């Protein structure tokens, strides 16, 4: 396998800062917004976005985390009644009539985002749901697109993108692995 770096730490920081500005501009502020990170790396990225937004706006944006494991349509184990449930939700706010901004590291087939949409809708009916991703690599299986993208990276189905974050991996970078 060949390994190439797509983003280094400073490039990742710039991409997240740009996304933070775009979120503020599109929503005309942050008063009705809640950043919700999809665990695991999306949650860390959401925290970083929240820090940047607070520096720009001078006030904190509401945040939360979502574990969508049991909402996955490709998960074979569900409860006896065939209904999935949120494994772990850390959203202290009412989502009804709010703008929810889902945050994830890589957008690929769209199945993770679909699961997150289902999980959020189970918590209430938001005014709007937006999506922010660090990397959009294409190959959608569902009609889902990101509103905010750090970097678009066209890939083949055999390539793999890995996001490394300081909080989990000890470094910030995005790499692509290609079969030789």
Image (spheres, helix red, strand yellow):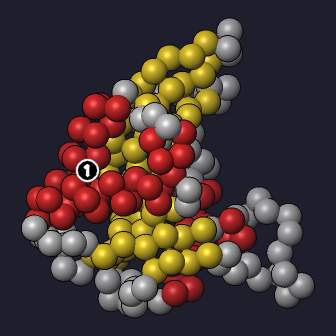
Tell whether 140 sits left or right of 94: right
Residue 155: image location, x then y, percent: 53, 27
* Residue most extreme to the top: 180
Q: Quadrant of residue 1?
A: top right
| Residue in the foreground of this view, choosing between 167 and 52 | 167
Task: State the residue at coordinates (54%, 39%).
Answer: 169
Task: State the residue at coordinates (45%, 41%).
Answer: 166
Q: Quadrant of residue 54?
A: bottom left
Q: Does 42 sit above or below residue 100?
A: above
Q: Check disc 1 and report its element: helix, strand or loop.
A: helix
Q: Quadrant of the C terminus?
A: top right
Residue 50: image location, x then y, percent: 28, 62
Residue 38: image location, x then y, percent: 52, 62
Q: Does 105 sit above or below residue 88?
A: above
Q: Is residue 25 visible?
A: no
Q: Is residue 171 visible?
A: yes
**Number of numbered callouts drawn:** 1
Residue 88: image location, x then y, percent: 62, 75
Task: State the residue at coordinates (35%, 68%).
Answer: 35
Task: State the residue at coordinates (49%, 70%).
Answer: 65
Q: Does 69 sit above or below residue 149?
A: below
| Residue in the foreground of this view, choosing between 158 and 29 | 29
Q: Quadrant of residue 147?
A: bottom left
Residue carrying label 1 = 19
* Residue most extreme to the front: 170
Q: Residues within 10 Å of mark 1 (few under 14, many from 20)?
A: many
């Amino acid at each position: 396998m060949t390994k190439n770096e797509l983003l280094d730490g400073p490039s990742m920081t710039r991409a997240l800062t740009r996304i933070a500005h775009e979120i503020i501009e599109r929503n005309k502020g942050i008063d009705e917004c809640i950043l919700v990170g999809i665990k695991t790396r999306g949650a860390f990225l959401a925290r970083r976005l929240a820090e940047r937004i607070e520096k720009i706006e001078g006030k904190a944006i509401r945040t939360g985390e979502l574990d969508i494991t049991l909402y996955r349509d490709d998960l074979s184990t569900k409860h006896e009644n065939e209904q999935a449930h949120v494994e772990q939700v850390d959203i202290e706010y009412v989502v009804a009539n709010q703008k929810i901004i889902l945050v994830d590291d890589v957008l690929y087939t769209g199945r993770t985002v679909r699961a997150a949409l289902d999980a959020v809708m189970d918590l209430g009916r938001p005014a709007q749901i937006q999506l922010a991703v660090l990397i959009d690599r294409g190959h959608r299986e569902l009609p889902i697109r990101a509103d905010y993208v750090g970097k678009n990276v066209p890939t083949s189905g055999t390539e793999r993108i890995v996001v490394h974050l300081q909080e989990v991996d000890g470094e910030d970078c995005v790499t692509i692995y290609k079969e030789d």
